[in-house]
Amino acid sequence: MIFQEFNPGFDKGSNLNWLIVFDRDNTLNQDSGYTHKVEDFSWKSGVPELLALLAPLHLNFAIASNQSGIGKGLYSVDDAKTFNSHLVTKAKEFGVAFSVIVFCPHDPKSGLLCDCRKPSSGMLIFLSEYFSINLNRMIFIGDSDVDKLAAESAGSLFLDINEINLFQSIIERVDQ
């Protein structure tokens, strides 16, 4: 698992009620297949509006993503980090500061068994420990069955990015 920190000065223990974790490709950004070039970045439809609605809630945000293109030799860890940095910078325009991105660089066809590649819950468990938050106070937003299985395996809540009332579903959980 590769760890990329963007807000190292935040206080992990203060006022931390919920952690919102997004999948990356086809959840936050349009996925053109092994998306890794900054010039190919574009938001998935509706995401900028969602981020703008979430920003005033002062939640903590992270990203957990499978990036098998690295393991397949299609792009490098540095390419992925550059793309991630660009995404984080663009998200700040809507008031959301992603603190951390974790990603699995492994090719599932390589035969290497790792605990980070979704549907394994390794990245979500790592984030819960990093943020010192219980997994039942984490919402994982994704677009696939793999994302849903990772959330269920970790014991966190899964919401589909394509859900019509996604913002309302988030509000209902974090107001508890």
Image (tube, helix red, strand yellow):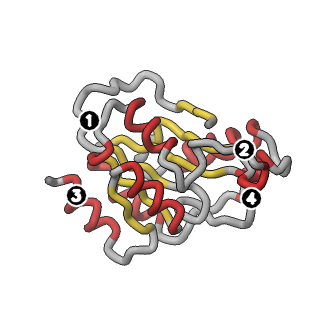
**Numbered tag placed on residue 173 in the rendering:** 3
Amino acid identity at mark 3: Arg
Q: Is residue 11 visible?
A: yes
Marks 4, 2: nearer the viewer: 2
Residue lying at 52% horizontally and 50% vertically, measured from the top left: 120
**Numbered tag placed on residue 112 in the rendering:** 2
Image position, residue 105 (x, y; %): 70, 44
Image position, residue 176 (x, y; %): 14, 53
Residue lying at 82% horizontally and 50% vertically, measured from the top left: 72
Q: Is residue 31 left or right of residue 6?
A: right
Q: How packed is label 1: few (under 14 Cα within 10 Å), some, or many (20 or more)?
A: some
Q: 9 and 22: which one is in front? A: 22
Image position, residue 173 (x, y; %): 22, 58
Q: 34 and 89: which one is in front? A: 34
In the rendered structure, which disc, 3 or 2, sits on the residue that comes first in sequence? Answer: 2
Q: Which residue is mark 4?
A: 34
Query: How far is mark 1 from mark 4, CA to CA?
Result: 33 Å
Marks 2, 1: nearer the viewer: 2
Q: 16 and 128: which one is in front? A: 128
Q: Is residue 167 left or right of residue 62?
A: left
Amino acid identity at mark 1: Leu
In the rendered structure, which disc, 4 or 2, sits on the residue that comes first in sequence? Answer: 4
For mark 1, give the secondary structure. Answer: loop
Q: Is residue 127 left or right of residue 66?
A: left
